[in-house]
Amino acid sequence: MPTGIRHVAAGRRTTEWRAPPGRQVTMAASNGSQVVIALSGGEIQLFELDADTNGHLSEVAKRDIGCEVAALTVQPLSSGRTRSQFMAVAGVDSSVRVLSLDSDRPLRQLAAQALRTTASSVCMLQFGQGTTATIYLAIGLEDGVLVRSVIDGVTGQLSDQRQRVLGPRRVTLCPLTVDGGRPAMVAMSSRPFLCFQANDYSGAGASGGQYQCVPLTFAAAEDEDAPGSSKIPALPRFDLAAPFSIENCQEGICTTSQRVLRIVSVERLNETFNQVMVPLSYTGRKFLPLPPPKLLSGQVDAAQMDNRIMLAVMEADHNTYNEETKTEIREALKKIKVDAGEEGDADVDPPAESQVGTYIAGQGKWGSCIRVVDPLTASTSFKLDLDVDEAATAMTVCYFYQLKDNRPCLVVGTATGVDPHNPSRSAHGKCYIKTYLYDESYNLQLIHVTPLEGVPSAMYPFEGRLLVALRGSPTVAPVLRIYELGKKRLLKKCEYKFLPESGGIMWLDVNNDRIFAADSRDSILVLRWRYSDNQMQVISDDTYPRCITAAAVLDYNTIVVGDKFDNIAILRVPSDAKDAGAWGRPVVEAEGISTLRLVPGRDNDYVSGNTFKMDLIGHFHVGETITSLQRVTMVAGGAEIVIYSTVLGTIGALYPFSSKREHNFLQALEMHMRNTAASPSLSGRDHVMYRSFYHPIKNFIDADLCEVYYQLPAEKQRQIAVDMDKTPQEVMKKLEDIRNRVL
């Protein structure tokens, strides 16, 4: 209460302490035997439980810090101790002070630290016991930054300061325990974070494990009817939090979010990601976000539409039936009378497909559909089943400039009778491009169907038009084509016919006037489109025939690719190729005048192999086939990174260095980790040979190997740090800073 302290002892004996007249209690903190309060005006008072007087709360000391108190905290009690050593108090003067709680000189200032802004909350965490314990002081600031420092267990001095941006809102801290009594802390800003120390590594140093600060997600209870509740993990905004313990939830967290009260428990503490599976009818081939439909004013609430995010999922499976045919087969099987014998039951339904598998349809048979999924509820909003034996092969969202209201269209490429084992050399049936519009409920409406002579393998929007790559076959050559929206079908406006016939274009992307095309066997082609001539020409290609499985454009000249042999490569178009847009290389004549060789109607440079060759900037062997590459920013204020996924389910990140000094630091650490005998091998063989399995590793640093530094014994950590002219804390701080920019 703001006027004093009320202490309820054993036997319900109650004692009260009243604040001086005209002053109120503004802050309070306690542990098992000590209570610290802050009075208005900046005065701090310390109380302790006196064991000689049966737990009577007595005043021990007081101190005036000279300014109003913004936050305070007390060190948790260690095992076997009756009082703590330190407390911390933050003032409105943008500073934090560490005070002693020793009985000899209580509330003596031991250390002080200036802050960038006023602190909103402070918290002490202690990992370990005795002389090997590590005491952290966490400080939440008003501008959304979490500051963490280490308190020396003997002198109380602050060191090893680290910062992390949690969000735009003020940071509120709440200490608690998780995973069987392990100390932890919830840091609440625009979203909540859980700070804890990971499980002890084998042979770890005095720190006992790696300090982690990870975002909290939660899955709402099935009977929760709160606004915004969902089945999938959500990132809520916690306003307040406190430890909660009952018989069936001993380490829970009681939280408030606006007008909703939730009780949550922390599970799967050491997992990086939280996930929920959405069942599909067929194998998911591709998915992309659907932008909100821009309808005429008055038809839908614009604010409501902007908050909705839908995903379009393209599903297809070979050697299977579509849903309509499966239903007919099930109905036919039910009509078949089978003699069940004495103990059998003839009326038993056939087992589910998830248990025994689906019906085998045969070669060239496909089942496919387009599904619209609401990611907030993990439910299917709309499902469109394609025709019998028709497979969806490509999909994109395109804004055609012919639509006056600028509504997005979902464009799907389909084909029948496709052989997935040898698609470029086998015959196929009919191929189409189907164009759909969708309303505010995301129900797809077919506009028209455009027949094609080849299988559409990739599509991408381009200047209000549609860029389509058609795969070659024994009777049709591969082609890259640009379409416009017509009244009854898509209209051909431009095409390029000199594509390689080996694999086929499987990925497209556009950056300004450059078109990046990835071939499944012949690596990357870079084309340029000229508006004046409405023509395309290859200006650069790769020197090595990579079997591309995924790619992502980094900038106007650079692209990152992954191939089927588990490699990631970064390629860059040479700077001389910027003058190759006028159909040809610059040619220097005898007089020294630079002119351009015009090639009307043909691309002789690419056919003759005379195009500019892309430079190999970096190469790295991952060890698993890459299935996807995306350039994203995972956290607010973090670095832009490249996320990759693999066929075995791994999700990794490629982080670009922000400075040469950072690169040199990690390069030196990687060299020491390769040479140290105490570091376990990630692959069971020499590290350089493994990462250079097909090509020598170039301009990549293996951060997985660098993070093995946490697992080394303390003496080995110190030896490596001394060789790098640093301390072990500085090495760990640098690794943690890089990880915080990613996650």
Image (tube, rainbow, N blue to C red):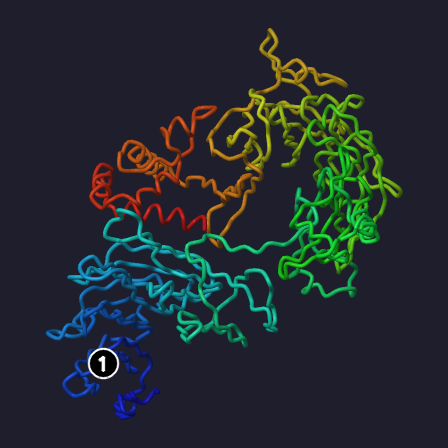
Q: Nearer the viewer, residue 27 or 660?
A: 27
**Residue 107 placement (x, y as % from top left):** 18, 74
Q: Quadrant of the N terminus?
A: bottom left
Q: Which residue is at 68% across, 55% downward? A: 373
| Horizontal side of residue 696 vs 71, given as left or right | right
Q: What is the secondary structure assignment of the residue under circle 1?
A: strand
Residue 514 appears anywhere in the view: yes
| Horizontal side of residue 507 vs 33, given as left or right | right
Quarter of the image holding residue 625?
Answer: top right
Give the residue furthest to the right: 488
Which residue is tagged 1?
A: 45
Residue 465 appears anywhere in the view: no
**Residue 48 placement (x, y as % from top left):** 20, 81
| Horizontal side of residue 618 vs 669, given as left or right | right
Q: Residues within 10 Å of mark 1 (few under 14, many from 20)?
A: some
Rendered position, 630 above or below 580: below
Q: Which residue is at 60% across, 26% downward? A: 523
Q: Nearer the viewer, residue 673 or 39?
A: 673
Q: Which residue is at 74% across, 40% downward? A: 360
Rendered position, 357 above or below 268: above
Rendered position, 190 above or below 245: above
- The residue under label 1 is which amino acid type? Gln
Q: Which residue is at 21% across, 39% downward? A: 719
**Residue 407 placement (x, y as % from top left):** 76, 52
Number of numbered labels in the structure image: 1
Give the residue furthest to the top: 590
Quarter of the image holding residue 377?
Answer: bottom right
Q: Nearer the viewer, residue 487 or 379?
A: 379
**Residue 683 placement (x, y as % from top left):** 40, 34
| Horizontal side of residue 456 vs 591, given as left or right | right
